[in-house]
Each structure stands twice: as C-alpha cells, then as structure tokens.
C-alpha cells in the first residue's frame, strides 16, 4: 500500500494559484510603449502560437509543482507484514585484531591463511545462521571498539567483520576492555540471554581492566562468556639451523580464558585449525534459545526520488525552453 509520511504538505498544492490570484490585485496597470490603431495584425500572427506556448508552460509548471509537493510528502510503499522470529538472545562477538593474528598457521583449501582470515571465513557463516538473534561486533587491539551495535541486520555485521584488518585497533590485546565494552552495550538490554563470544590468540597486554575483573562484572550482569583460543600448537619453520618445529601459540593465555568462561557459566574452546574452529561455531549455534512471541514488521521502500527526479527534469525543460524563447 502507498503511504505518505507527511501528508499535510499536500495542502501546499494550491499555493501558486493563491499567489497569482491575490498578487494580481496589486499589480499596477502598465501603459503600452507603442500605440497602434489596430491590433488585429499582431493578434492574427501570434495569438495561436502564444496560446499553445502558454498552455504547455502552464502544464509543465503545474505538473512539476505537484510532483515536488508529492515528493516532499515522503511517499512510501509499505509491503506485506513479515514474521520475524525472535529468540530473545543478544549475542556479541569480540574479535582480536592484534598483530599476532597475522600468523599464517591455518590451512584452507590447500593454502595457508592467517588467523584473522580463518576467523572471518568461519564466523561469517555463523552470523548468517543467527536468525532471530540480535548480533553486535566488537574489535579489539590496544583498545576495544564497537564496530556494530546490536542489530537484526546480519548482513551489515558480516560486512563489518569481513572488512576488519589486522592492526586496525592496534598491535596489542585489550581483552578486559573488550569485555567491559560488551557489558556496557548489553547492560541496557532487557533480554534474558546475553552472550559474548570472545576470540583471541594471545594474552591481555593492554587496556585498563583486567580480564578476570571484567569477567566477574559480566557474571554480575548475567552475561555469559564463551572464549575461543585460536592458533596452531605446532608449526614447522625454516631457520638458519634447518627446519624446526615451534609453537606459534606460546603466548596464548588459556588459563585466563578458561577462568573467564567458568566465572560466567560459559565454556572455553581451543581452535588449532579451521575444522576445529568451524566445529566450535557449530556447537555455539546449538545454544538453546529463549522462545518468545513472533514479531512482525512491514518492509518500507521510499518512493520520493522518482517524483523528485521527474520534477527536476520538467523544471530543466522549462528553463531550457524559456532560454530559447519557446514559452514566450
């Protein structure tokens, strides 16, 4: 159905008529600059042309004005009601963008990729499945930043995640601050299920709040934290002494991540490769939702650009015609 957001603006439609009607009373009569005994010759040669030009000018000007007022009233096309399933869960993702996330110890389709790329590939699929959840995105490095507030718009959250780059928030890791930011954003929500999924490959090296203290605050607010430690535990590298096996996840603070999850009633997961990371997100996907009544919304589409564009086109034609003397 068609709906006008500001229908009262339609009252301005007769405004040009009123201006012309009442202003004509105050116009002074002008004397002719040239007096001739008979005007029949002028009338015969110009009467038909002038009449046709005036009609076209009036038609174009009136139509342009009507379209402009119609566009100003903000016409919208309102679609049929769409049922939106609501689970009642607010889900916040906190992704580590520190410098260590550039370590290429994950394999995907036969090639080695860095940890952030692996996270983006798997987490984006997880986001797509979160129908009914409100999802937010926090990116953290030296500090924590809210990249996407809680929203049902999964496409936008996924886009923000895929656009994230290593070092965007700094080279260090502020785990505690990311939890504090999640608490702040989720505190105002009245949902019964509040979940934070925190993914990191290191230890807390920056920020003003310690991870354990932040987890204790989260437990008081009813925020459940699921922590994911990412990174391979064994990797073969070439050095001066030949090929050696090293542990690229030596800096991962699993003890703290486990305690954070335990304090809030969540779980800790370890992802050493892409398959394990995908399995973790599949497990998180099975979290029991809180059933609530379905909500409905009606999609709306703004229509004002069309009449506005046509009005501008007609106005341009009028100006161009006047410049060439067509409407004179």
Image: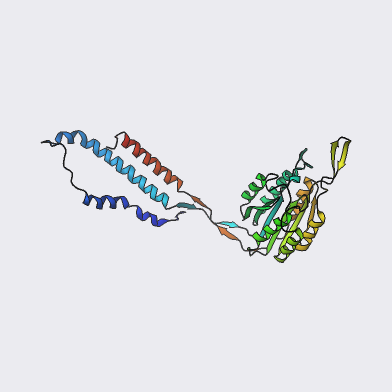
How many numbered marks are there? 0
Comparing 184 with 321, the one in front is: 184
Comparing 306 with 139, the one in front is: 139
Comparing 83 with 107, the one in front is: 107
Q: In percent of the image, x 41 and y 56: which residue is there?
A: 7
Height in image: 175 above or below 111?
Answer: below
Query: In what quadrant of the picture does the C terminus appear?
Result: top left
Q: How is the image coloured?
A: rainbow
Q: In percent of the image, x 88 and y 39: which residue is there?
A: 244
237 left or right, relative to 129: right
Measuring from the top left, give residue 30's x and y in whole percent: 18, 44
Residue lying furthest left: 37
Residue lying furthest bottom: 220
Q: In percent of the image, x 19 and y 33: which residue is there?
A: 45
267 left or right, relative to 138: right
301 left or right, relative to 312: right
113 left or right, relative to 24: right
Measuring from the top left, give residue 186's x and y in whole percent: 65, 61
Tell me if I can see residue 88 in this picture.
no
Residue 255: quarter of image: bottom right
Tell me if I can see residue 179 in this picture.
yes
Measuring from the top left, give residue 145's x and y in whole percent: 66, 52
Height in image: 69 above or below 315?
Answer: below
């Amino acid at each position: 159905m068609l709906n006008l957001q500001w229908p009262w603006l339609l009252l301005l439609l007769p405004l040009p008529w009123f201006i012309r009607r009442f202003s004509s009373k105050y116009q002074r009569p002008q004397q002719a600059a040239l007096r001739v005994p008979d005007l029949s010759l002028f009338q015969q040669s110009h009467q038909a042309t002038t009449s046709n030009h005036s009609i076209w000018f009036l038609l174009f000007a009136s139509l342009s004005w009507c379209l402009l007022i119609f566009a100003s009233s903000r016409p919208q096309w309102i679609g049929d009601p769409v049922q939106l399933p609501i689970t009642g869960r607010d889900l916040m993702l906190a992704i580590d963008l520190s410098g260590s996330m550039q370590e290429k110890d994950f394999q995907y389709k036969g090639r080695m990729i860095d940890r952030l790329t692996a996270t983006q590939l798997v987490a984006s699929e997880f986001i797509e499945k979160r129908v009914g959840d409100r999802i937010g995105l926090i990116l953290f490095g030296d500090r924590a930043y809210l990249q996407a507030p809680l929203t049902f718009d999964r496409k936008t959250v996924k886009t923000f995640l895929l656009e994230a780059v290593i070092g965007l928030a700094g080279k260090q890791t502020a785990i505690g601050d990311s939890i504090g930011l999640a608490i702040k954003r989720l505190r105002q929500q009245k949902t019964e299920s509040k979940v934070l999924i925190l993914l990191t490959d290191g230890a807390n090296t920056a920020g003003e709040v310690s991870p354990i203290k932040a987890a204790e605050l989260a437990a008081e607010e009813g925020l459940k934290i699921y922590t994911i430690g990412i990174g391979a535990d064994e990797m073969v590298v070439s050095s001066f002494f030949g090929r050696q096996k090293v542990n690229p996840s030596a800096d991962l603070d699993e003890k703290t991540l486990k305690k954070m999850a335990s304090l809030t009633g969540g779980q800790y997961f370890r992802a050493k490769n892409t398959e394990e990371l995908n399995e973790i997100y599949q497990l998180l996907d099975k979290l029991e939702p809180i059933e609530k009544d379905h909500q409905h919304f009606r999609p709306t589409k703004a229509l004002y650009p069309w009449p506005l564009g046509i009005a501008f086109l007609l106005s341009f034609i009028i100006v161009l015609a006047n410049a060439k003397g067509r409407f004179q």
